Structures are given as C-alpha cells and as structure tokens.
Image (spheres, rainbow, N blue to C red):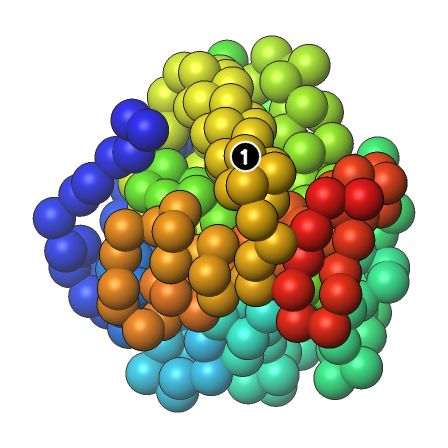
Amino acid sequence: MPFLTEPEPPRGVALDVLPGIRRIVARNPGVMTYHGTNTYLIAVDDGLTVLDPGPDDPVHVRDILRAADTVPIRRILLSHAHRDHLGATAALQAATQAPTSGFHCAATPIFTPDLPLADGDTIAGLTAIHTPGHASDHPAFAYGGNHGAKILFSADHVMSWSSSIVNPPDGDMRAYYASLLRLLERDDTIYLPGHGPILANPRALVAEMLAHRRHREAAILCALRTAPASVADLATKLYANHNPMLKFAAERNVLAHLLKLHAEGITVENGTVWRMA
Ligand SMILES: [Zn+2]
C-alpha cells in the first residue's frame, strides 16, 4: 500500500501542519506508534483546542504547555481512549483546567469525558464522525477551519504510515469495514492522522485499505477451505513479518477477521481451531 514515511521529526516542538494547526510528536516511538503519537494544537477563536494529549509522559505535557505559550488551552479532545492518546490527559487537564471531550461511551472505565460527544456533535468547529473498528469509542473529527481544505482528523482509524490493528473484543472488523466505507462516501481532501504525516488525497488510501482487508479475508477463507487452522497458523501463513510485536498485531487482526466471518455465518471455531461453517 502507498504508505508515507517521514524522517524522525524534531522533538519537543510544535510543527506547523496547516494554518492554525500544529502537531507535537510525542516521545513514544515504536512498531505500533511510528515516531510517536501526534498531539494536535488547533487555534480557534477563544484559544487552543488540544486533540489527543498523548502518552503519560511529563516531558510531553511540558512540551504542549510550552507550545501553547500564553494562548489558553480551552478544551482537550480525545480521538479514543487508548493509552498512547489518553495517557497525558489527566496531567494536561490539571495544568490547564480545560474540560475534556470524547466519545460519550468511552471504552475504558478510567476515562469519562466532561463533555461527551455523540456522532455528529460539533465542538469548536470539529464535528465528531463515529468511526469504530480500531476502537469502539473512536470518532474522527471533520474540520472546515479557514483553509478551504476539507480536513479530517482521522486519528488511528486511517493513518498515513500504516494500517491499524483491529484488536478484539473492543476492536471490531465489521465496524472497521463500515467505518472505512463511511469515509469513502465523504469528500475530505486532507487527513491528519494520530500517527505519521499529513495525508493528501486520502480516499485513494482508504480504498486500498479496504481492498487489502478484503484480500486478507479471501486468503483466510482460501486457507480454511484447505484445512482448519488456528489463529497463530493463519497469521504465520499470511504475514511475513516476524517481529514479536507485529506478530501479536497480525494474530489480533486475523482473529478480528475470523470473528467477522463468524458473525456472518461463514466460519466457526472449534476449540482453538477455526474452520468453514
Ligand atoms: Zn494511537
């Protein structure tokens, strides 16, 4: 797939992305996070909106406060409650007294947004587009801003550098497909993801991601028609990479496909082995 790469961004500084939008790349690089989580600072009439505080790292919180400088942080938005996005929320809120906002039904009991959002709700010019799949509580945020471009903060649903892990039970492959289809029906011109650089012409990548998952699903069915198999067997057969973290992600993605196929009446599980229904 035509994923984007970028050199390691400078640390501790807010990088200009688009007029009125900056990002700070957190210091949590990894095989699942690329160079780190993107924390976005969005300039609005009353000050700043921070989208995704990032990991629990006091240095990152200091970087956010430093980048805001004298401009007040008015609200803290969360794309989903995974810890690489949620971790710094409490510390940032303690430092700013800004209310938090996120999907009304958070996937973890450790986070309750002060201002809960439902699909279609708008806050500070950002409209929540519920896009479950990677996480059940995941909205993307559509933003008209003042740039002429139709911007979507796509968070971890669609990233420029990699496909997303769909990790059951909160990750749901049927929801993920539906959320990709939902984005294909939109006409956003730029995505700003939760990890990785700005993505222009995003619908081409979304279409490829959907095709890639359908191809993977077909390969799983092809294997199961030959012989029943475990999740680990299928992941080894279908994925070339042997990095232990990526192996974990591969197995979770395979399981998510199998659960989707099971919900559709196509596969069944027998102990640890899956076969055609
Ligand atoms: Zn993330």
**Residue closer to the observer: 173 or 84:** 173
Amino acid found under the numbered disc labelled 1: Cys
Q: Residue at x 55, y 85 (%)?
A: 91
- Compared with 160, 30 (above or below) is below
Q: In the image, what residue occupies the spot 59% across and 69% down?
A: 82
Name the residue at 67% across, 34% down: 177
In this rendering, position of residue 86 left or right of residue 259: left
Disc 1 crowd rating (10 Å Cα; few below 14, some 14-19, many 20+) is few
- Residue 228 vs residue 14, the one in the foreground: 228
Q: Is residue 235 above or below residue 212?
A: below
| Residue name at image x 86 percent, y 59 percent | 104
Q: Is residue 206 visible?
A: no
Q: Residue furthest front?
A: 226
In this rendering, position of residue 78 left or right of residue 115: left
Residue highlighted by disc 1: 222
Query: As drawn, is 187 to the left or to the right of 243?
Result: right
Q: Position of residue 243 (x, y in %)?
A: 26, 67
Q: Position of residue 8 (x, y in %)?
A: 14, 56
